[in-house]
Amino acid sequence: MDGKTIIVNGRAVLGIELGSTRIKAVLLDEGLVSLAHGSHSWENKFVDGLWTYSLDDVWAGLQDCYANLRRDVMEKYGVEITRLRAVGFSGMMHGYLPFDKDGRQLAAFRTWRNTNTAEAAAELTELLEFNIPLRWSISHLYQAVLDGEEHVADISYITTLAGYVHWKLTGKRVMGVGEASGMFPIDPETKDYDSAMVAKFDDMMARREYRWRLRDILPTVLCAGDDAGTITAEGARLLDPSGNLQPGTVTCPPEGDAGTGMVATNAVRPRTGNVSCGTSSFSMIVLEHNLKHHYPSIDIVTTPDGWPVAMVHCNNCTSDINAWVDVFRQGLELFGCDADTGTLFTKLFNVALEGEADCGGLLSYNFYSGEPVVALAEGHPMVMRFVNGKFSLANLMRSHLYGAVAVLKVGNDILLNDEHVALDKLTGHGGFFNTPLVGQKILTAVFGTPITVMKSAGEGGAWGIALLAAYSVDKKDGQHLADYLDEKVFAGNEGVTLAPDKAEVEDFNRYYKSWIEGLDMERAASNVSNR
């Protein structure tokens, strides 16, 4: 069938992801090829010392994104979307959204970006003997307990952004196992919250006389392909106020951006991995067996079908690059040049490859917020240059690209060099890879391993959740997610692979050594700003 017929017959699949700076929607045909897109730009806000998005902005953004998708469909095919074969919702992983028994929001949405949970994370890591990162939902919950926040006693349900949207559109309080693994540790055998750890947490809470128990307030865990409910009539109107979208669409379990990234890069089998570089950055390597130790810089999460994954998550990546590009745009506008943003990024990324091996003595720190991987409680973007260095545009941009991903090396050196984790394939995705070969070349130097980038690299999240939605309705009996992706989605689509250059690996390692030593400047900046 052609695209118009697929849409009219309700055979298209929809994926929507709420990212840090954009809400994106992609509509796929039965061959899982893109038919139409929609998007909405938004930004987090720093309110009362916490990074947040209002729920009003969530719904305004979702509705605008979906309206833009409808508009794209109308312009291309001359029809309305009335029915869908399946739909999936994804969002920024982790964070904290608490509600009472009547569904009232009890506290502002606390995103993954917040680093106020150090005390809670440290105590939980010791209690559970498992690395609990600052951004996990359980860290936010327990920090609220430690801080004596009154709302904790009234909690009936806590969820993440993806889980919240899914709940409101389907009525189901469920969560994909990959997203759930960023709320509380998962037992890889049961693919559910670890019972022994739940018991330890509940015992600690019982001594504080809270009436709720952890399993009562967490979402039910589902694996990829499980029944996650359908869009209700109320949910259809909430997503599409025009009234064209009919209820009854099958949904997949909601997942976070980590899970959708794994799916979009076909990295759900053991010994495969992906690295995502956008507003934040993270690498995910699917493990064959558990690590020997737990580490502050490495999270253990899961694939959407429950395989354990070693995740190195960094709060900061491209935000500072975006800010510098905007400064260059403003400079061009002073001279009457109307610079296209995409062209500007492409040219500035490409000129970075002309920079010197040592970036001309420049060091760039991209920390807009705190960075737990290197024990920074707060962030201060910074550029430092030696007086005998060469301050050029090429060196500045090369330093920005190096600085954006240097923190990824901290945790991955442990995995690859100390734990000797096997890795056959690493795939890159996210905005850092939008300019062909440039970001890819930088990452091969960081990891010292080949990096593959596919055509979907810049829009992987929305596509990834759309693939999970399609899997929910397409899968054959007993067909695993990895097999479905190999056979249905990625057959013949291997992407472009770039091998590391030994000299460039050595160049980056020298930069990295200076970058690590310079972190003391970041800590000093925090002392100055707090006077």
Image (spheres, rainbow, N blue to C red):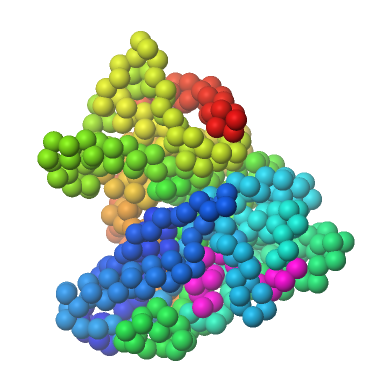
166 falls in the magenta region: yes
- Please tell me which residue lies in front, 131 or 505: 131
25 left or right, relative to 181: left
Q: Residue at x 40, y 78 (%)?
A: 239
Give the quadrant of residue 108: bottom right
Q: Is residue 224 left or right of residue 440?
A: right
Look at the magenta stretch and give its main secondary structure: helix
Residue 101 position in % (x across, y down): 67, 79
Which of the two residues, 444 or 158, is positioned nearer the viewer here? 158
Up the image or down, 297 lies above or below 186; here it is: above
Q: Which residues are magenta?
A: 153-168
Residue found at x 70% / y 57%: 144
Residue 66 visible from this viewpoint = yes
Q: Is residue 224 left or right of residue 35?
A: right
In the image, residue 172 sits, relative to residue 143, either above or below, namely below
The single residue placed furthest to the front in the displayed view is 531
* Residue 285 seen in this snapshot: no
Q: Is residue 368 shown above or below 130? A: above
Q: Position of residue 420 (x, y in %)?
A: 58, 38
Quarter of the image that includes the C terminus: top right
Q: Position of residue 204 (x, y in %)?
A: 83, 59
Q: Residue furthest top?
A: 388
Vertically, is 2 above or below 331?
A: below
Work out which quarter of the rendered image holds the N terminus and state it. Answer: bottom left
Q: Residue at x 20, y 83 (%)?
A: 79
Residue 471 on the magenta segment? no
